[in-house]
Each structure stands twice: as C-alpha cells, then as structure tokens.
Image: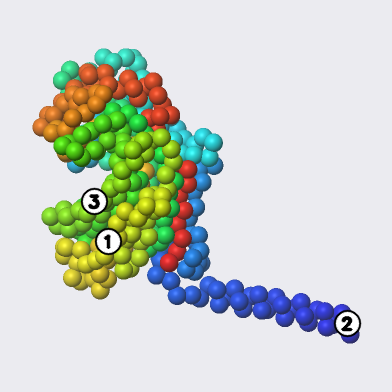
Amino acid sequence: MERRTLNFSINLILILILFLSEIHCVCKKVTTVSGSLAPKKFCPGDLIFEENFDKFNKKLWNHEISLYGGYNGEFQWYTNDRANAYTKEGKLFIPPTLSYKYLPCKCYKALTSYTLNLSNCTNADHEGCSMTGRPNEIINPIRSARIKTDKSFRYKYGKIRIKAKTPRGPFLWPAIWMMPSNSVYGGWPNSGEIDIMESRGNDQILRGTEELGNRRVMQTLHFGKNHQFTETHNTNAEGFHKQFHVYKVDWKPEYIKFQVDNYPVHTFHGPFQGNYTKSINKIAPFDKQFHFIINIAIGGTNGYMPDDANYAPESKPYANSDGRRVGQTKYWNSNIWKGIKNNPDESSLQVDYIKVWAF
C-alpha cells in the first residue's frame, strides 16, 4: 500500500512538472528568432543568445571574404583567417594585420604589382574578388575580419548587452552592429541598420570643438530612402580603448533605447521617416529580424574620416576625393600603419561577451 501511494505521488509530481513546463512554453512574447542555432522555445526574460568566446565558434560566425571596400571606400581585405579573428582568455580579438606578408614574395613590392584572386570570395563588387596592384593603386594593404550570425542566429526585439573594448590605432574603424536578414523595405538603408558601437581608433580627430577620435563612441540608426540617420554618442575622457565597457540596447516594438555602461544615451521612438506606411508597427523598419556583425574596417573615403578635422599625433595622409585605390596607397606610403604592426593587442577590437534576452 505504501509503495502504491509513493508511486502515485511520484507520477503526480512528474505530470505536474510536465504540465507546468507546457504552460511556461506557451507564453506571450514579442521576440522572434530563426537560424540554425536559434532556440526552439523561450519566454520573455529568457536568455536566447549567449556568446562568451571561450572558443571561436565556426558554426555561429560566418566570415566575409572580400577586397570590397564597401560604399565607404575602405582599405581592408576581409579574410577567414584565425590571424584576424581568434579567441584568447575568453575574449574575441579582431586584429588588423599586414597584407604583404600573405602575398607571394612577402614583400612590399607585391602590393604594387601582384594580381590577387580570392578563393571562396563572398562579395565581388568593386574588385572584391580580384585586384591587380599598381604603383599608384596598391592592393588593400591591411587584412582584417568581418564576422556575422546571418545563418546561425537572427532575431527581432531583445535586451542586448555587449562588453567590448575599442582598438587604438590610426584610421581604425571598429563596429558592432546589426543588419536586417531580409531587405523587406528595400535596399540599404531603407530596411534599416542598428549600430550598437562604432568608433575611430585615432587619439585625436578634432573638428572645431567636436572630438571624433577614440574618446567617442557612436550608437546610430540608419533608415529611409534618403538615408536619414539618428546618431547619438558618448564621450569618455580617457578613451574607450583603455578598458571594457558595456554597450546596451533595449529593442522593443515601441522604442529602441541605447546605453553605454549605466549612462543612458538616447531613446528613439517611431515612426521613422520613410516608406513604412504598410507596416502597422511604428518602429518600422526595425520590426524585422536582424543579425549581428563585428568588424574592423580601415580608413575609408566616404567622409567618416573627415578631411576638415585636425588629426593627432598622425595627420591624415589622403583626401576623401582621392577615392579608395589612391587613398589606400597614400595611407600605406605614409607608414602610419606601423603603429598597428607594433601593438597587435591594442589595435584589436576585443569582445568579452554578447548576450540577448527575450521580450
């Protein structure tokens, strides 16, 4: 009799646990996810993405492989090479390295004469898969990495926390950002872009009284047919490269709130200007699934490195009107890249963790 009672009690407890589990899984949430590593079941408040960089997860991160400098006219060669994206002591490092060391003669001359054809190239635009070096138009002189979760983890709405340290070095352009996984509202920037952290590596870029160097980080939304954008920024007297900071985004159907550490930067409420009248959500175009991107770009001729500013200690060796190929040649000939070569850890974008909770 006692055994029957005990068995009955155990079975009742198991049934109750299963019942409560089902109740937990049927919950009202606004967050949606997809991708090969996205969770199958979750509720508001659950941790749905956690990357602690104990190792480099090749199933999670997809590499761009290209010489394409983007519409920004950047100078880097994106690789799938652990020299440009690796983990150490539980942190992701993305260091820029020198391209000539990976060309046949491992000499500077190769930048001015070699034809580089990339295998497994992901973007052929603007000589992205094949480029021939010439004396006044060299091959992209710096290698870097751009990694993304476009296949493994895509999501809409969440509480995002990223602990990172920006790099220090002339004309480094680090970014942790998100792009839409499908361009539902049209090509960039119509379907939106969320910049969680963006900076510049120079010690000083002073335009009037405005400091644009490594003592400043930006958190920005891009959107609209005519490229409206809402840039917010935070400044730190010692520079964001000195220590790790936590970059925060609360992305909800009603608003997008940016923070750095415990400092509230700005909260953006829709509706946003653009052709978003077909959407019932006032946060459009930020009402679709996005994915993470982490990268360091170099230089650029789109104006992000402005001509009308004072740079120190290194001056700007090229003009934006030079265009990418001439601009990167002048950058290389100035030798300011030697600071990158001599300080690989300091020149690296470092990320401690990325976490996302559901709403």
- Which label belongs to residue 88? none
* Amino acid found under the numbered disc labelled 3: Glu
- Which label belongs to residue 268? 1
Residue beneath the point at 16% across and 63% down: 274
Q: Position of residue 223 (x, y in %)?
A: 21, 56
Write down the quadrant of residue 35 in the picture.
bottom left
* Amino acid found under the numbered disc labelled 2: Glu
Assign a secondary structure to mark 1: strand
From the viewer's perspective, is residue 292 above or below residue 358? Answer: above
The residue pinned by badge 2 equals 2
Q: Position of residue 336 (x, y in %)?
A: 27, 21
The residue pinned by badge 3 equals 231
Mark 1 is surrounded, within 10 Å at the Cα level, by few (under 14), some (14 to 19) or many (20 or more) other residues, namely some
* Amino acid found under the numbered disc labelled 1: Phe
How far is mark 3 from mark 1, CA to CA? 10 Å
Judged left or right of residue 163, residue 321 is: left
Judged left or right of residue 32, residue 310 is: left
Quadrant placement of the C terminus? bottom left
Q: Which of the two residues, 278 or 240, is positioned nearer the viewer here?
A: 240
Write down the quadrant of residue 24 in the picture.
bottom right
